[in-house]
Amino acid sequence: MQKVYIELTSKCGLSCDFCPSASRVLSDMDIELFTKINTEIKAFTNDVAYHVVGDPLIVDNLKEYLDISHSVGLNVHITTAGYYLKPSHSDVLNHPVIKQINFSLNSYRGNKLPISLDEYLGKIAEFTLAFRKNNTKSFINYRLWNKEEDNSQQDYNTQVIQTMFEKLGAEIPSDMDMQSKKLRVISKVLFNYDNLFEWPSLQADFVGDKGHCHGLSSQMAILSTGNVIEELCKHCSYRQKFN
Ligand SMILES: C[S@@+](CC[C@H](N)C(=O)[O-])C[C@H]1O[C@@H](n2cnc3c(N)ncnc32)[C@H](O)[C@@H]1O
Ligand code: SF4
């Protein structure tokens, strides 16, 4: 499998207007269960992400989880809104197990936060520069997964891009291509753009019967309660494949 999602916690402390996390009961993953899952999934994948919903930076003992994934030889992908970033994270995340850290920069736009956009981005820029000094291996991605048909995200994205280039002491390329999916800021620090999507749900409108399901073939997700996310497609033979 390309990647397994193991949700450390369902808590994220935010309520982005594009994400259904608020409907989840709050829980953290038990360390023993996490150890068991890490050990077992190593046979299927090399890469784990520490979220489904929830935010791994809200977890106080993040290093303990990182050490466990490292001990079984996995690579870890951290995805965070960055709102709960603390100065200590530049040390905690400078861990050999970390392959990449994704900051979801659309989070500010999806909430009514009591800080300015400049303060929010400032903390992430500060982290990036401190981290980059000590770590030349792991990638940092600034996600803007917010493209909509009417391009209503454009002004926000322009402001975010300008602010981050300025704070990181880099120059915006004059030939910047907003159709491209990536934009390099400094070494191993990139913007990553994508579309806003609708979360799958049995309550959502029927979308069609053509397509391919990647569930349990290229990826799978385990919630902080230990439950595996079951596929929405009625043809899935998940229960026969995994007990
Ligand atoms: C559910 S969040 C969990 C991790 C963490 N709380 C965060 O926000 O980065 C994982 C990723 O999904 C993205 N996301 C959530 N809802 C989305 C949507 N409707 N369309 C596009 N991306 C979405 C978030 O921006 C984030 O990058
Ligand atoms: S996108 Fe992340 S931070 Fe925003 S509500 Fe969902 S889980 Fe929380």
Image: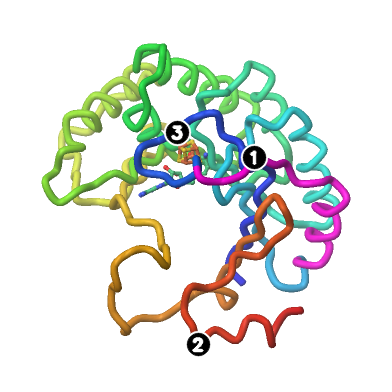
> On the image, which quarter does residue 191 sit in?
top left
Q: Is mark 3 within 8 Å of ligand 2?
A: yes
Instruction: Indicate the quadrant where residue 105 lies.
Output: top left
Q: Secondary structure at mark 3?
A: loop
Q: Residue furthest right?
A: 32
Q: Dot 2 lies on which element?
A: loop
- Most common SS among magenta residues: helix
Question: Dividing the image into 4 quarters, which one contains the C terminus?
Answer: bottom right
Of label 2 and label 3, which has the lower sequence position? Answer: 3
Q: Which residue is mark 3?
A: 15
Q: How many numbered marks appear? A: 3
Rendered position, 54 above or below 230: above
Report, in whole angstroms, how far the alpha carbon at label 2 lies from the one at label 3: 33 Å
Q: Is residue 176 above or below residue 240?
A: above
Q: Which residue is mark 2?
A: 235
Q: Mark number for residue 26?
A: 1
Q: Earlier in the sequence, mark 3 or mark 1?
A: 3
Front-lying residue, 148 or 218: 148
| Residue 120 location, quadrant | top left
Task: Give the left or right position of residue 219, taking residue 163 as reference.
Answer: right
What kind of residue is marked 1? Leu
Question: Dot 2: few (<14), some (14–19), or many (≥20) neighbours within 10 Å?
Answer: few
Residue 223 rendering spot, x and y as whole percentages? 65, 55
Secondary structure of the residue carrying numbered label 1: loop
Which region shows up in magenta? 23-41
Amino acid type assigned to the residue bearing label 3 in the image: Ser
User: Marks 2 and 3: CB-CB under 8 Å?
Assistant: no
Closer-to-camera residue (205/69): 205
| Residue 34 drawn in magenta | yes
Report how far apart the C-alphas of labels 3 and 1 lie in the structure: 13 Å
Residue lying at 41% horizontally and 20% vertically, measured from the top left = 121
Question: In which quadrant will I find the N terminus?
Answer: bottom right
